[in-house]
Amino acid sequence: MHKLPLLILGFFLTLGAKAQTSAVVKGKLIDSVGKQMLKDATVTVIDAKDSTLIVFGLAKADGSFELKNLPFEDLIFQVGFQSYEPYSKKISPSKTNIEINLGNIYLRQMANDLGNVTVSQSPIQIKKDTVEFNASSFKTKPNAVAEDLLKKLPGIEVDKDGGIKSQGEAVQRILVDGKRFFGDDPKLATKNLPPDVIDKIQVYDGLSDQSAFTGFDDGNRVKTINITTRKDKRKGVFGRATIGGGSTGDEGVYDNNINFSRYNGDRQITVTAQGNNVNKQNFTGQNIFGGGGGFGGGGRAGGFSTGATTGSSGIINTWAAGLNYRDVWGKKTQAYGSYFFNDQKTYTDQKSFIETLVSGNPDSSNFSNNLTSSIRHNQNNRVNFNIETQFDSSNSMILRPNISFQHTDNENNTTSAATKGKLNLNNSVSRTTSVNDGYNGALEATFRHRFAKKGRTYSIGINLGGSTNDGSGTNRSINQYFTQNRVDTINQINNSNSDGKNFSSTLAYTEPIAKNQLLEFNYTYSFSDNTNGKSTYGYNKNTGQYDLVVPNLSNTFQNTYSSNRGTLSYRIQTKKLNLSVGSGIQFGDLKSNNLTKDSAINQHYVNMYPTANLRWEFTKTKNLRVNYSGRTAQPSATQLQPIADNSNPLNIQLGNPNLKQQFTHSVRMLYASFDVFTQRSFFATVNATTIANDIQNSVTILPGGAQISQPVNLSGTYSMSGYFNYGFPIKKPKSNMSFTGNVSYNQSQGLINNVSNYTKNTLVGGTVKWTTNLKDNFDMNFSSNSSFNFARYTLQPQQNADYFTQTFTTDATYYTKSGWVVSTDFDYIINRGQSAGYNTTIPLWSASIAKQVFKKKEGEIKLYVFDLLNQNTSIRRTVSGNSISDVETTVLKRYIMLSFTYNLRRFGATGQQQRGNSPMNQMFRGSGNRGPGEMRNFRSGGGE
């Protein structure tokens, strides 16, 4: 088995080696009338037999070109350039004709543009801070979705649940044609849009509305993917409807969904709905109750979680529906928004083995075995809207209101047993329930003005927010402590409520001081007010009611935070350089009021806010970016509230009203390169972060094995990570290969019984990915991912842990002209170095056979079997500041399903150029001659 990855890798490398040849064609492109050199014209070589693209590139500034690595066979050389007539010539490289010099090639200008010209584009472009992929350069299987296209792109990873990473960072926002699609939910775009309506995939760091307008980065970056649709697909209707049913052998399964889009120029409407009990979720879940109020907060466990899983854990029943709307109102206003509802019920059975470090005895730890069964019911309604008005060439305004309503109903049953060596510490049986209802609303408003003097602008941004949550719950448990020879019984109910509101306003003014140089003055005021209340009542045997107030579990707590920050920044922008540096000072006040005990704690902060951003363009296809920023984060109301949460009596959480704010320093470097002649891409990222006054946990281990955790401010937290991706095409078979490497180091300090313990985690990983790019009837993708993890503890080095996860993934689809489609996918997962019983090997194999029906193959009848071997399992290891947890969770196992799908595609003529399959003509619309501010203006118009 260990030789298999090497054999597979060797096979693909051999394919790449065989594709290398030594013939070359070169020459120079010149305008036939003006005699000027034609920079950036597209030169292409295709196979004379089947028109397969061999290689392409761009002419240099002097009009010269040179295409290498040509095979010894009959080829066709082509030139394409906007507004010029195409040029074509047959060439025949051979061992005796290795270098073909075509000399000067004179191109004639067209009298006018042709409406039916087909274009072929570069698979990758690098435009300032944006990496752009041409969708037509990456072939997908029949009935694919945008997610399948993303999986083929170098530097982009898509996990089993649909989570997306680009260049090692999580993608948090997906736009469609520069606008938000169903709010900020990435999955609703990637799991619903078909690839055949997609023109480009653009990846960049999205900025706030004000930063996109001024060009000064405020540090609020969001990794963003913008999907641009084909112009010839912007008038018509398209969609898909599926109905499916089957069985696991014990019970029935179903999978029904519909997606329908109607595009009529600027007016675009999309409707989506789904219902299934097979763990499919074409949207991102939302939990407005998870933050506890406030503007952020830490309280991390100082560790990380890893392990290979095969998809969502538990058994999930999902019902969801949504509407996305986009239009232009009049001549000045763009409006777009969405409504989405989801109802999910998740059934989970889980077993875990937890090792808890205890100070004072380096050879001793507490161990616990736990069994948990839970039911989580979540209902969510969310509405997002955006209004962008361009009053005139100088003034514009953006409004973004949004609101979410949520209802949750959860039940949790747990049994556990803890030991220390051969000594029994405790047993526990518990049942908790909770019901919560609440909302979260916000309004973002931005007004922007450009003065007549170029570069002089001002903008004002306002953010308003409010939230509320009302909850109730029960807590019943029996806890037996053997070393203390006692039994504790808990029988309580609790009521909770929280209210929060926040406001912030930012005023920015830019002033040109010299050619290509600007100053920015920025002032920000922010305010938040959060109140958390909790009342706990014990059961009264005398009255049969829950009327005994539990004082140490009842409290009302309010915290307010206000800050004033002023910043001065300088920016210089040239053809190759974009540099901005700045510094600011912030005054902050945190007031914590214990309303129950009538006590208050006031804290005052003064922080410097340095920033620096550099982008250096070596060439049009190579650039380097360096960013530095500092930011504060306030403790949440939950972390500050000085009462205990005993919902888990063996792990009691206690707040700390004396917490201080955190301050984070972050440095990031990104390098991107693409060679248009060899089509080789390289991306690299380096990140470093350190946190002052980091909020970590102080854990007290009690004699009976229970523990109390309380957030405290500690030093010594920092992290470093590096990532690279190298990708290149293979000619035979036509495919793409990429290699990814990543390494990270994280260190944090925690307290165990008031003794310092540093947790140091190192991860080293790599991925090999091979994806086919064939035109005919076969699609195949393969990847191999390795992850080595090393956990180190300064308090108990004997408990250091090393573990390893290896995942092989392959999928293949074969489809015939008569409409038969056969698909299979196989995952092979190896977990090693974990606790006994958790070192698993998981083979997950699924397959389907389908027949396309009707005249245009719009329909499809499919028989699908998930987990043919019935081996699906979920194993995960979590390393925190004082514990190592191995967790196995129930997952969906084998089922068989028969489904029918109908695909709708009806588009009207738009008069736009049609994108064809020929690799001839211009590489980029407009020949890549984008103005230096065009991408920035696009984002400003789109609010991104």
Image: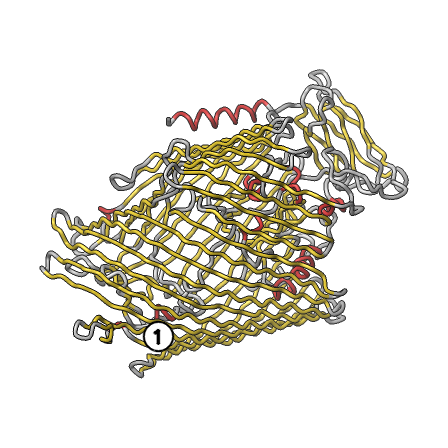
Q: Position of residue 175 (x, y in %)?
A: 61, 54
From this view, report whether residue 561 is shown above or below residue 883. below
- Give the SS element for disc 1: strand
Residue 551 seen: no
From this view, report whether residue 390 is shown above or below residue 677. below
Q: Quadrant of residue 137?
A: top right
Give the residue displayed 31% in from the left and 53% down from the top: 880
Q: Position of residue 442 (x, y in %)?
A: 53, 69
Give the residue displayed 16% in from the left and 63% down from the top: 488
Amino acid, disc 1: Gly
Q: How many marks?
A: 1
From this view, report whether residue 744 is shown above or below residue 50. below
**679 or 29, which is in the foreground?**
679
From this view, report whether residue 665 is shown above or below residue 255. below
In the figure, is residue 444 to the left or right of 830? right
In the figure, is residue 575 to the left or right of 659? right
The crowding category of the residue bearing disc 1, from other C-alpha atoms within 10 Å (few below 14, some 14 to 19, many at least 20), is: some
Q: Position of residue 255 (x, y in %)?
A: 49, 44
In the figure, is residue 352 to the left or right of 95? left
In the rendered image, the residue lying farthest to the bottom is 598
| Residue occupied by mark 1 | 533
